[in-house]
Image (cartoon, helix red, strand yellow):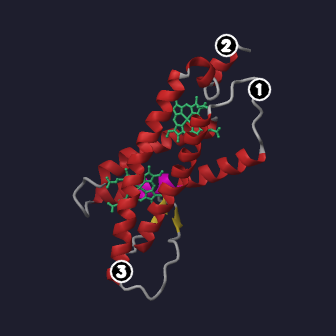
Amino acid sequence: MAFHWASFALVLLLIASGVLMTRLTPGSADGFMLYQLHKSLGVALLLLTTARIVRRSALRRSADGMQAPTALAQAVHVALYIALVAVPIIGWGLVSASPFAIPTTLFGWVTWPHLPMPTDLDPASRARIAEALSRAHAVLAYAFVTLVLLHAIAAIRGGRPTLARMVPGLRRRSPSE
Ligand code: HEM
Ligand code: HEM
């Protein structure tokens, strides 16, 4: 549950910083800081999601008498997990492929490595790969927003029994328990 709401906060910050930074004047100091913040938050989300998936596979959650999610809700959850992993990995790939080779410093503190790239790639090929990954990153990030909206609408429409699975306060007062 804490993982769920921490991921939600991180995704909101990532979308806001991603949209803002790509619309600032290229090369500005604020832009550089925002890119570093965006990359730091994205790597934090990737690590958090890895921990969440490991924990989820280790502890098969019991249904606790609660109604199981529908097949459609489960399919949306799988798609959300895929987006939570794929969007940051593609972002990581694009900064690693970029011929500018700008380092990623997590929260101004530790250097995050670039993904290994073939050593024989010339700068023009690196730029083409980075450009393709950048497009994929943007398209998938906006598809992710759509998916989150559908998921949130479904959770709200499911009412208290559905929301209680992620909002502990509702769970205690749920009439079904
Ligand atoms: C779930 C995690 C993430 C989300 C939701 C996200 C979202 C976004 C969004 C909405 C944009 C703006 C796209 C546009 O309008 O052009 C963007 C751009 C960008 N993101 Fe992410 N991002 C995530 C993770 C990451 C990570 C982990 C990195 C790198 C380590 C990263 C690096 C970048 C870069 C460099 C750009 C600018 C691309 C360009 O303009 O060429 N992102 N991101
Ligand atoms: C970035 C935003 C979000 C992401 C990435 C996300 C992701 C997820 C995932 C992956 C699950 C499945 C958990 C599991 O069983 O392993 C889940 C469940 C759930 N989420 Fe979200 N979520 C987000 C936002 C929201 C919002 C805004 C709400 C409330 C309006 C919400 C309400 C719920 C509820 C109630 C469940 C459990 C019930 C169910 O649908 O079966 N989520 N979420």
Residue 166: image x %, image y %? Answer: 62, 29
Q: Residues within 10 Å of mark 3 (few under 14, many from 20)?
A: some
Q: Residue at x 67, y 20 (%)?
A: 171
Q: Could one spot residue 107 in this view of the protein?
A: no
Give, as a single range, the part of the protein colored magenta.
36-43
Pointers 1 and 3 in contact (C-beta within 8 Å): no
- In this image, 21 relative to 51: left or right? left
Task: Confirm or reject: label 2 Cβ below 8 Å from ligand 2.
Answer: no
CA neighbours of label 2 inside 10 A, class few (<14), some (14 to 19), many (20+): few
Question: Looking at the magenta stretch, what is its main secondary structure?
Answer: helix
Q: Position of residue 2 (x, y in %)?
A: 63, 36
Total tally of numbered discs in the picture: 3
Out of 48 and 85, give the one closest to the viewer: 85
Asked if the residue under mark 3 is in contact with the one under mark 2, i.e. CB atoms within 8 Å, the reply is no
Q: Which mark identifies residue 173?
A: 2
Spatial separation of the CA atoms under disc 1 and disc 2: 15 Å
Q: Secondary structure at mark 2?
A: loop
Q: Position of residue 169 (x, y in %)?
A: 63, 20
In terms of depth relative to the viewer, which is nearer, 157 or 115? 157
Q: Amino acid at mark 1?
A: Asp
Compared to residue 166, the image places residue 37 above or below, namely: below
Is 130 situated above or below 80?
below
**Considering only order in the chain, which callout, 2 or 1, is on the residue closer to the N terminus?**
1
User: What is the distance, in whole Å, between disc 1 and disc 3 at their CAs?
Assistant: 53 Å
Is residue 59 visible from the viewing direction of this image?
A: yes
| Amino acid type at mark 3 | Ser
Question: Which residue is most to the bottom?
Answer: 120
Locate residue 124: give its quadrant.
bottom left
Give the residue number, with chain letter if any, for mark 1: 64
- Whereabouts is ligand 2, in terms of quadrant? top right
Q: Is residue 71 left or right of residue 39?
A: right
Q: Is residue 92 above or below residue 68?
A: below
